[in-house]
């Protein structure tokens, strides 16, 4: 197997963290099923040593082999904001929700964060809450779903952390289901593993790929329209014309986290997980990911 030399930050990587260094290569097993393969991406431009982006921490991982293609401080913990919602979604699916259940929004569902789309006293289905949470990152919808499942927020967070252990996210810790608490922390590498796991669920993947969604409030005649927070859906990274397909992902923002984005992108049948944490602005997180994707697919050849 050819030796692949990658410019990497000087960080000691432990096997417990799910990162393995073999023959100057770093591999991250996104799932236990992924094994080493001779069919790996080969660096074709050794002179192009990296990228200039605003994200403080980032990583790109080849899905088929787990090979780390480029990274910076990918093992350092930081808050991950609303990317947390993908773990929340996986735990909700484990609890087998009734999608047609009617839920009345209460004062206890009201919280801070992004502009809410659901208000106290409004009746909606659980399915509409799910869409609001994953498409527009609605925090009120998250809290209403947890409440309607008959689980306390404390117990739900325990389930989230148990799920993290199950997925071998050893550098990840959750404190609330919305992502508003800066104590929801992870690393770029763990985020890549978590997002990949979340996208294996059709209910999650189909929702995060919807550009917009409209639904009726059940106890009045109002209609509600929500828009996806991920503008990459409308970019060249999700364009058949340019050979790209966005498989799915999630945005996040907190003052303590900066602007964050984690996505899986396919180019000519080759899938790569990209994570950019603590970008400077809302626009930068998307531009940083575009730069990373462009660099990876120009500097590696899959053989």
Image (tube, rainbow, N blue to C red):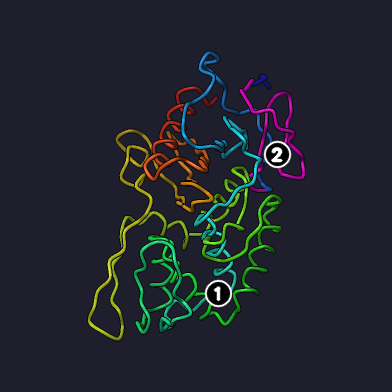
Task: Give coordinates of residue 117: x percent, y percent.
Answer: 34, 69
Q: Give the range drawn in magenta.
A: 5-31
Task: Give coordinates of residue 211: x percent, y percent.
Answer: 32, 55
How dense is the environment of label 2, judged by Cα within 10 Å: few (below 14), some, or many (20 and up)?
many
User: Which quarter of the rendering shows the N terminus?
Assistant: top right
In this rendered view, identify the residue nearer to me: 82 or 273. 82
Tell me which label, 2 or 1, sits earlier in the chain: 2
Q: Is residue 30 magenta?
A: yes
Q: Which residue is located at x 69 percent, y 48 percent?
A: 32
Q: In this view, does 284 lie to the left or right of 198?
A: left
User: Which quarter of the rendering shows the C terminus?
Assistant: top right
Q: Does the magenta stretch include residue 98?
A: no
For residue 301, above or below residue 265? above
Q: Which of marks 2 and 1 is in front?
A: 2
Query: Circles 2 and 1: CB distance less than 8 Å?
Result: no
For residue 228, above or below residue 34? below
The residue at which mark 1 appears reads as 96
The residue at which mark 2 appears reads as 19
Task: Give coordinates of residue 243: x percent, y percent.
Answer: 36, 34
For residue 261, above or below residue 82? above
For residue 71, above or below residue 177? above
Task: Give coordinates of residue 187: x percent, y percent.
Answer: 62, 45
How dense is the environment of label 1, judged by Cα within 10 Å: few (below 14), some, or many (20 and up)?
few
Q: Is mark 2 on a helix, strand or loop?
A: strand
The quarter of the picture where residue 126 lies is bottom left
Q: Is mark 1 on a helix, strand or loop?
A: loop
Check the image and name the residue furthest to the left: 221
Q: Which residue is located at x 46 percent, y 28 percent?
A: 297
């Amino acid at each position: 197997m050819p030796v692949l030399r990658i410019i990497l930050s000087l960080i000691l990587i432990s096997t417990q963290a799910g990162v393995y260094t073999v023959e100057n290569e770093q591999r991250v097993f996104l799932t236990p099923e992924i094994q080493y393969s001779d069919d790996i991406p080969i660096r074709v431009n050794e002179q192009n040593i990296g990228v200039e982006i605003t994200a403080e921490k980032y990583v790109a991982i080849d899905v088929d082999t787990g090979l780390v293609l480029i990274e910076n401080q990918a093992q350092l913990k930081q808050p991950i904001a609303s990317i947390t919602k993908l773990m929340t979604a996986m735990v909700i699916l484990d609890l087998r929700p009734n999608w047609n259940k009617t839920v009345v929004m209460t004062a206890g569902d009201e919280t801070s964060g992004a502009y809410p789309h659901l208000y106290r006293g409004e009746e909606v289905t659980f399915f509409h809450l799910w869409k609001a949470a994953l498409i527009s990152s609605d925090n009120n919808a998250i809290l209403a779903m947890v409440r309607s499942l008959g689980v306390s927020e404390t117990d739900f967070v325990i389930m989230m952390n148990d799920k993290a252990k199950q997925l071998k996210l050893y550098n990840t810790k959750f404190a609330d289901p919305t992502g508003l608490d800066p104590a929801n922390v992870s690393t770029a590498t763990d985020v890549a593993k978590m997002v990949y796991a979340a996208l294996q669920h059709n209910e999650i993947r189909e929702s995060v790929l919807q550009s917009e969604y409209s639904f009726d409030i059940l106890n009045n005649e109002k209609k509600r329209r929500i828009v996806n927070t991920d503008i990459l859906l409308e970019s060249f990274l999700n364009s058949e014309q340019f050979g790209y397909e966005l498989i799915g992902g999630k945005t996040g923002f907190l003052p303590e986290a900066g602007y964050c984005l984690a996505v899986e992108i396919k180019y000519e049948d080759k899938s790569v997980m990209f994570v950019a944490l603590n970008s400077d602005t809302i626009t930068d997180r998307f531009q940083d990911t575009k730069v990373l994707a462009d660099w990876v697919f120009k500097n590696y050849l899959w053989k």
